[in-house]
Image (cartoon, rainbow, N blue to C red):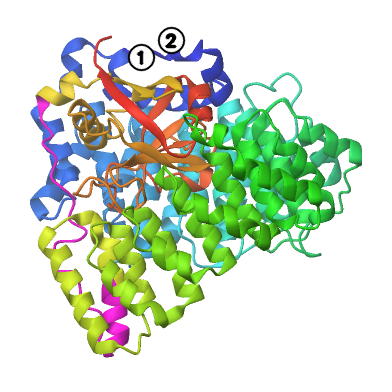
């Protein structure tokens, strides 16, 4: 059993979530086991039928009836599961079945009902409300606001605030109504939890609806208050400050005093956000990258020196990005020094930014040194500097990049050849791109075809058609896209149809991006509408949700060992995402992830891995359904990568920082318990040695 106290005492964990996230969400964790007697922990037949109906996405009236009955159950846990399941269907017509949950005696159920209403309303994005019988978005707001005014539980009020911010409004009047409700709540906040709810509501409202209606002056005042350091509450209020500052960045409204305070905030994520404002100021006058006005804030040279030497690599990295926005004159000296940074992610970003520093002999020499440093390149986990340097050198000094590029194009590992293909595209080296398009690695082929499309256009159609026969979905997708507009319509069409038939016969859900690209190009070549995929795309795999596995995995952990890096542990959220946890656990126990890699590393965002093809487009064959819940995408949250609803293929990602824009759009099924420092050290291509599922208490 992973108890609240056992997580909260972890120093790293406390810094990541500040204890606040846990207090808000752990009450609904693990089927309520921490507070329930042993017999209540067993998944009853009713609860199991709810999970199974949800897993099927309730395609029949009987399935919907099961969920409705569950939501009305006299057992609080069963009712909570029913409410959650109804919301996840994203059918606005079911909101009247969820709304009574706002009056449930248990505050956990009222909070779940508020979250479920917000999720069910997302269906309007696909199918707008029709006719007088359709439930009204305005009436939902009225109901939520009325409940928020009388509810005596801070967690419930916080859930309602967040839902008010993320409802799919279509008019400025609706957005104004939501803002007024949040302002009223802000005026009477009673706790840290209330302030967090207001902050989450405003962040969603500003992010999603600022084009409908920018935040009012009164809202900006509240956001500045939320973002400002609160004496005596610096630790527990860190996430509130992040959300407040994030909202101000989106609105383009942080002022000089607030930026100064944020740049010295004890929380590194707040300092990182301050760097984003500075970066925005370096863009063309009058914009901050999101359409809002830019504050006239002029940092001194001393400020830059402080930021570039910050103790936290996420701040140093963001400072380098901010300097890039100011131009090469200021960015290049900092990037030269940054290339020597002790943190590899900062160093690699600095190397990337040296591509704009061709006028600096020191920068060019540094890039040449990294490209030619065979000792580092051949060391375990040592290829990255040379790979990034050859692409940067191609931009900074094309003539000096040509010779070493030919050597790297034949190097091991394949990632070096992939970066060589990127450099060849910068140099417009058609011959090398054609050679790399035939590489044994589908990832190298994909990048080379992308470069050929730009450099050679349809002169390379024969190469694209040959690539359609490859097994990698990413290479097939790139080849199909490159053939759009080909003058060899008959020949290209035949090759595309052959590839299409092969992919459909294989019946793998996760080839849908390749199939979509083929259908789009065929439609363009033939002038006929793209044919729909005839292989059941969008139908998720039915999981064997059974009582034995749910009992066995009631309170599991996962121990992940990364080769040559270290080990970290996850708490798995069986109550929030049972189908996802079961799928992940079964794959892990079968050894599926052993030897796979983290192929995508985006500093200050996420790392992603678990693909047999080490790319975005190859994963476990069958899709898994989303299980969108209330746990937020905070630093250390573990989610499932998708490209559209219910398209997960068992690839996982880990949030390196708080990413509120991912909330309620990507399943969170776990949270890093310990070893977040190991996660921070993971580089592109690092190997998952093994994943062990620990079911003991």
Q: Where residue 134 appears, x then y in whole percent?
A: 31, 65
The circle drawn on residue 6 is 2
The image quarter in which residue 521 lies: bottom left
In the rendered image, the vertical position of residue 501 relative to residue 180, given as above or below: below
- Is 521 colored magenta in this rendering? yes
Q: Residues within 10 Å of mark 2 (few under 14, many from 20)?
A: few
Say which of 158 and 695 sits in front. 695
Give the secondary structure at mark 2.
helix
Report which residue position mark 1 lands on. 2
Q: Image point 24% across, 55% down: which residue?
A: 510
Res. 34 visible in picture: yes
Q: Where residue 94 appears, x then y in whole percent?
A: 26, 53
Q: Tell me the quadrant of the picture where the N terminus can be found.
A: top left
Callouts 2 and 1 close, C-beta under 8 Å: yes
Say which of 284 and 560 sits in front. 560
| Magenta span | 518-547
On screen, residue 441 versus residue 408, left or right, reads: left
Q: Tell me the quadrant of the picture where the C terminus can be found.
A: top left
Q: Where residue 341 appears, x then y in whole percent?
A: 69, 32
Say which of 635 and 479 sits in front. 479
Give the secondary structure at mark 1.
loop
Q: Where residue 677 appears, x then y in whole percent?
A: 53, 22
- Is 602 colored magenta in this rendering? no
In the rendered image, the vertical position of residue 74 relative to residue 567, given as above or below: below
């Amino acid at each position: 059993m992973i108890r609240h106290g056992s997580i909260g005492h972890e120093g790293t964990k406390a810094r990541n979530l500040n204890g606040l996230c846990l207090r808000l969400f752990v009450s609904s964790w693990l089927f309520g086991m921490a507070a329930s007697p042993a017999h209540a922990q067993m998944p009853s037949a009713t609860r199991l039928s709810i999970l199974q109906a949800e897993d099927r996405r309730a395609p029949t009236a009987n399935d919907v009836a099961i969920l409705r009955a569950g939501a009305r159950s006299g057992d609080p846990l069963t009712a909570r599961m029913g409410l959650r399941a109804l919301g996840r269907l994203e059918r606005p017509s079911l909101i009247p079945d969820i709304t009574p949950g706002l009056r449930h005696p248990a505050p956990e159920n009222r909070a779940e009902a508020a979250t479920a209403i917000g999720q069910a309303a997302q269906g309007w994005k696909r199918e707008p409300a029709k006719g007088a019988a359709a439930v009204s978005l305005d009436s939902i707001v009225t109901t939520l606001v009325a409940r928020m005014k009388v509810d005596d539980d801070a967690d419930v009020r916080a859930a309602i605030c967040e839902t008010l911010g993320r409802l799919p409004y279509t008019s400025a009047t609706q957005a104004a109504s939501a803002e007024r409700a949040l302002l009223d709540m802000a005026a009477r906040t009673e706790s840290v939890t209330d302030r967090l709810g207001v902050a989450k509501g405003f962040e969603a409202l500003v992010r999603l609806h600022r084009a409908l209606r920018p935040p009012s002056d009164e809202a900006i005042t509240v956001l500045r208050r939320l973002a400002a350091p609160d004496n005596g509450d610096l630790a527990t209020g860190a996430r509130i400050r992040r959300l407040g500052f994030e909202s101000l960045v989106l609105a383009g409204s942080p002022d000089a005093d607030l930026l100064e305070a944020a740049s010295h905030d004890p929380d590194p994520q707040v300092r990182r956000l301050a760097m984003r404002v500075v970066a925005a100021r370096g863009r063309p006058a009058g914009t901050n990258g999101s359409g809002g006005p830019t504050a006239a804030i002029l940092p001194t040279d001393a400020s830059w020196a402080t930021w570039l030497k910050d103790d936290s690599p996420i701040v140093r990295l963001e400072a380098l990005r901010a300097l890039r926005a100011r131009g090469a004159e200021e960015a290049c000296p900092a990037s030269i020094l940054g290339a020597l940074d002790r943190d590899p992610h900062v160093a690699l970003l600095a190397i990337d930014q040296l591509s704009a520093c061709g006028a600096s002999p020191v920068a060019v020499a540094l890039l040449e040194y990294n490209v030619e440093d065979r000792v580092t390149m051949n060391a375990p986990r040592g290829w990255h500097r040379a790979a990034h340097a050859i692409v940067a050198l191609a931009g900074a000094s094309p003539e000096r990049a040509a010779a070493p590029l030919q050597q790297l194009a034949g190097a091991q590992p394949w990632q070096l050849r992939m970066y060589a293909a990127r450099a060849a595209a910068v140099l417009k080296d058609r011959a090398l791109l054609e050679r790399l398009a035939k590489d044994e690695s589908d990832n190298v082929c994909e990048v080379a075809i992308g470069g050929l499309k730009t450099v050679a256009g349809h002169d390379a159609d024969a190469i694209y058609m040959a690539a359609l026969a490859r097994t990698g979905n990413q290479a097939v997708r790139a080849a199909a896209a490159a053939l759009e507009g080909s003058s060899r319509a008959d020949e290209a069409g035949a090759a595309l149809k052959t590839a299409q038939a092969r992919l459909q016969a294989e019946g793998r859900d996760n080839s849908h991006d390749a199939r979509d690209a083929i259908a789009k190009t065929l439609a363009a070549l033939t002038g006929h509408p793209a044919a729909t995929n005839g292989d059941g795309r969008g139908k998720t795999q039915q999981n064997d949700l059974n009582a034995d596995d749910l009992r066995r995995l009631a309170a599991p952990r996962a121990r992940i060992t990364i080769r040559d890096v270290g080990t970290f542990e996850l708490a798995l959220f069986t109550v929030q995402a049972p189908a996802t946890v079961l799928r992940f656990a079964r794959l892990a126990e079968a050894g599926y992830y052993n030897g796979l890699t983290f192929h995508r590393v985006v500093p200050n965002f996420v790392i992603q891995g678990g693909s047999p093809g080490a790319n975005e487009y190859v994963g476990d064959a069958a899709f898994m359904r989303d299980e969108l819940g209330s746990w937020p995408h905070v630093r250390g949250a573990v989610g499932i990568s998708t490209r559209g609803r219910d398209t997960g293929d068992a690839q996982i990602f880990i949030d390196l920082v708080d990413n509120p824009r991912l909330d309620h759009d990507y399943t969170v099924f776990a949270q890093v318990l310990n070893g977040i420092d190991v996660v921070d050290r993971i580089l592109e291509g690092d190997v998952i040695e093994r994943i062990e599922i620990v079911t003991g208490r």
